[in-house]
Amino acid sequence: MKLVDEAEISVTAGNGGNGCIGFRREKFIPLGGPDGGDGGAGGDVWLQADENLNTLVDFRHQTRFKAQRGENGMGSQKYGKAGDDILIAVPVGTVVHNVDTDEIIGDLTEHGQRLLVAKGGKGGLGNMHFKSSVNRTPRRATPGEEGESRVLRLELKLLADVGLLGFPNAGKSTFIRAVSAATPKVADYPFTTLYPNLGVVSVEPGRSFVIADIPGLIEGAADGAGLGSLFLRHVQRTRLLLHLVDISPMDAMNGGEHMPSPVEQVRAIEHELRKYDPAMLEKPRWLVLNKADLMFEDEARAAAEAIVAELGWTQPWYLVSAIGREGTWPIMLAVQTFFDRLREDAADAAVS
């Protein structure tokens, strides 16, 4: 299923029921007095994260949600029934924005987590509340309050541990095929991946992580060029970035247009990350030089070392052939060790 990662919906909570004006009238009780009951509260609107959903596509067909109104109060001090709440299921990883104020209302990151997005109105008071020593027969009741109404923008951010960076056609889809059971589309033209793909890498029972193959990046992505906004939104949540670069000189020309060199591609993506969110450059980022199979082994190694030297790269780097699955699994083992160490450090910090 294609991932729809943004939707706009309107939600309206239920109005409260009106209070009742009533008087007790029973035989032999001439002074029964006021007995009008309160109106019921209006239903609330909730969002709930559901791990079985991975898209917001349903909200293309249904965009309006309204909770039930509370019932009016009745005589004999009978309270009106509260309106039923509405529970709207959304994928885990959904960020909820208030369109009118542009504020973030909440972030649903765990299965079953709920978020109140519109509060139902309170029920009105019946006339039994207004009886006093100077007003034995009050003919006053209050109407129910209106429920809250909001326009919400839902934004889905993938909850992946590892994100794959890289220009279009760098080999990200091939790489995720090589290391997981994911089967994204693979072809020799740019923007093969139009929607993020998730794959689970299982090193051994009980040791696994989620890797995301995300649409390729081009210059100007932070300003919305190409698939940039889609790409950058999803890498924000990842804890480790694998930066794939094509080292093959055969791809230096694409349809007659000059392609940036490997070093230029790395610098361009760093520039877009900095423009979109400087904190993303602080994430651990490993360099993966791909398509080594298109060069002789010695040439590929020399080219890789030259790229690393020109970049002044200090983090881990790897030379691989994703299509031949050469050198990919050692990276996965290193990634798993990286996450194991993070968990150990967190556990030590919790104890201390």
Image (cartoon, rainbow, N blue to C red):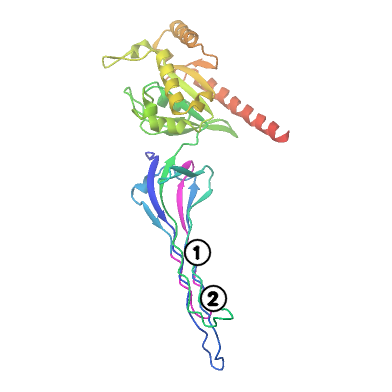
Q: Which mark is residue 122?
A: 1
Viewer-side residue, 131 vs 52: 131
Q: Which mark is residue 130?
A: 2
- From the viewer's perspective, tell me whether residue 64 is left or right of residue 44: left
Q: Is residue 93 magenta?
A: yes
**Residue furthest bottom as drawn:** 28
Viewer-side residue, 104 vs 258: 104
> Does residue 322 show up?
no
Q: Position of residue 216 (x, y in %)?
A: 38, 26
Q: Does the magenta stretch include residue 293?
A: no
Q: Position of residue 303 (x, y in %)?
A: 44, 8
Three-letter amino acid code of the residue under disc 1:
Lys
**Number of marks drawn:** 2
Residue occupying the point 50% across, 64% down? 122
Residue occupying the point 39% across, 27% down? 222
Viewer-side residue, 253 vs 221: 221
Instruction: Say which quarter of the image contains residue 321.
Output: top left
Quadrant of the drawing holding the N terminus? top left
- Which SS type dominates the magenta stretch? loop
Q: What stretch is highlighted in magenta?
A: 69-95
80 w.r.t. 76: above or below? above
Q: How far apart are marks 1 and 2 (CA)?
A: 17 Å
Residue occupying the point 54% across, 84% down? 33
Q: Where is residue 349 in the image (x, y as percent from the top left)?
A: 69, 32
> Does residue 24 show up?
yes
**Residue furthest left as drawn:** 256
13 w.r.t. 82: above or below? above
